[in-house]
Image: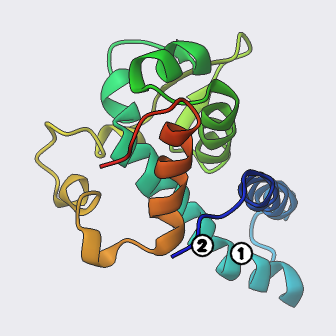
Amino acid sequence: MSAIPQPEIERLVDKMNATTAMTATTAKGQTPPAHVGMFQLLNGVFVTGAISCLAWLGVPDLVEHGPKSAEELATHIGADPRVLYRLLRATASVGVLSESTDGKFSETPLSAVLRRATQFPVARLRDHTRQRMAWTRLVPARLLRAHGKASA
């Protein structure tokens, strides 16, 4: 399997964020136009991949006791802070993390169930490699390779 180039990963994350922003403007109780509904469905693969990557990297465990910046998290994980920031923003855009005005990311009820010590079955799914899609495996590999670390 060939690696996805960094610009392509960034384009996909931007696309996910743009689709999320577009769908957030639909009034409560209104059915979105068909093209918006389809973007929401197609966007699911990117959301799933981003959440899986976030859990695989252990970010939910790192923000359990308080907000952290992308730089702090990147240092702990051994990732490229710019790429990690995009992942954090992408997952915050769908409510998995919360981003404060000072640029720090904190836990939400959604990220809490992704921590390693949680009793919920969803936390165990993050390590289920048969269920992971290629995209979700490439992002952690790209993040770690950016700093000369090999992925597991």
Residue 60, image x and y in percent? 37, 34
Q: Amino acid at mark 1?
A: Gln
Q: What is the C-alpha distance between the residues marked 1 and 2?
A: 7 Å
Give the numbered dot on residue 40: 1
Q: Quadrant of residue 54?
A: top left
Q: Specify whether 5 is left or right of 67.
A: right
Q: Nearer the viewer, residue 53 or 1?
A: 1
Q: Does any portion of residue 32 appear in the rendered image?
A: no
Q: SS at mark 2? A: helix
Instruction: Identify the residue at horizontal 47%, vertical 50% (top origin).
Output: 141
Residue 58, image x and y in percent? 34, 36
Instruction: Identify the residue at horizontal 81%, vertical 61% (top origin).
Output: 15
Instruction: Identify the residue at horizontal 59%, vertical 64% (top origin).
Output: 3
Q: Does any portion of residue 40 appear in the rendered image?
A: yes
> Where is mark 2, residue-wise?
44
Residue 43, image x and y in percent? 68, 72
